[in-house]
Image: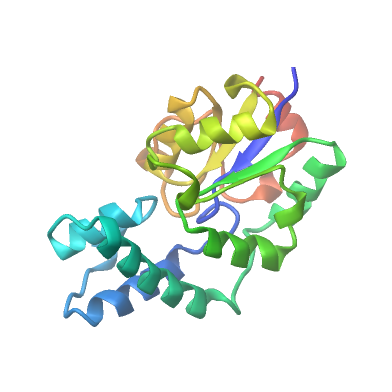
């Protein structure tokens, strides 16, 4: 059975959450809203922009308004983050070892494609991925499994042959809903704050291909 590895992006490939916080703080401050870090931890990390904006603005945000507000906030994020792209410790070595073994890899993120292009492009991994899926490519966001089921399809493997790296409650839930193995990356949350994963890491230095193979 061929296997594949799928990465979420924010909090998995790069620890971007602090920069998303800054972007959202600037975005909301323009609207005289000042969410706390605790509120962000509960209602931002791992959530879709439609949820985040609706929650903090206190009304449903959808359609064209969602597209415009999302673009404003994500443009702020890219401006803040563009000179700070830095992978989580050990990620590049681990990724290169996967490629050396000929394992297919993908990214499945709730972030817009422009963010993915910034991060994966800066790290030089965009063209080394066999599947690239961002928010524009799905109709239903995590915890719905759509992005991971589509990833498996593109990677030409069965769902139960995939290992997903995730850092958020909704992301882990999406991967489990897709019937995949999950490695919890403890960059933004503790083990107790996530659904039960098959393995937990703080960074990729703790991981080998052998320890992944043991999941099967």
In the rendered image, the quadrant that contains the N terminus is top right
Residue at 74% x, 48% y: name it.
Answer: 95
In the rendered image, the quadrant that contains the C terminus is top right
Viewer-nearest residue: 95 or 27: 27
Q: Which residue extends farthest top? A: 1
Q: Is residue 82 left or right of residue 73?
A: right
Q: Is residue 153 left or right of residue 21?
A: right
Residue 47 is situated, as x and y percent measured from the top left of the image, at: 35, 51
Residue at 33% x, 71% y: name it.
Answer: 24
Q: Which residue extends farthest right? A: 100
Residue 191 is situated, as x and y percent measured from the top left of the image, at: 43, 40
Q: Is residue 213 visible?
A: yes
- Is 54 rendered above or below residue 75? above
Residue 88 is situated, as x and y percent measured from the top left of the image, at: 62, 58
Q: Quadrant of residue 33?
A: bottom left
Residue 21 is situated, as x and y percent measured from the top left of the image, at: 37, 69
Residue at 19% x, 79% y: name it.
Answer: 31
Q: Quadrant of residue 60?
A: bottom left
Q: Is residue 188 left or right of residue 115?
A: left
Viewer-nearest residue: 21 or 77: 77
Total marks placed: 0
């Amino acid at each position: 059975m061929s296997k594949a590895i799928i990465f979420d992006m924010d909090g998995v490939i790069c620890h971007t959450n602090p920069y998303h916080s800054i972007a959202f703080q600037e975005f909301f401050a323009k609207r005289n809203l000042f969410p706390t870090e605790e509120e962000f931890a509960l209602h931002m990390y791992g959530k879709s922009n439609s949820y985040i904006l609706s929650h903090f603005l206190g009304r449903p945000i959808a359609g064209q308004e969602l597209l415009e507000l999302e673009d404003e906030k994500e443009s702020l994020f890219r401006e803040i983050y563009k000179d700070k792209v830095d992978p989580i410790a050990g990620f590049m070595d681990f990724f290169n070892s996967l490629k050396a073994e000929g394992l297919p890899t993908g990214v499945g993120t709730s972030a817009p494609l422009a963010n993915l292009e910034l991060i994966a492009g800066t790290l030089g991994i965009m063209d080394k991925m066999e599947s690239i899926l961002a928010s524009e490519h799905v109709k239903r966001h995590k915890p719905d499994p759509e992005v991971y089921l589509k990833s498996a399809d593109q990677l030409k493997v069965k769902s139960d042959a995939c290992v997903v790296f995730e850092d958020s409650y909704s992301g882990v839930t999406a991967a489990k809903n897709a019937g995949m193995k999950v490695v919890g990356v403890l960059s933004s949350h503790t083990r107790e704050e996530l659904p039960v994963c098959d393995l937990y890491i703080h960074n990729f230095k703790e991981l080998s291909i052998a320890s992944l193979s043991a999941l099967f």
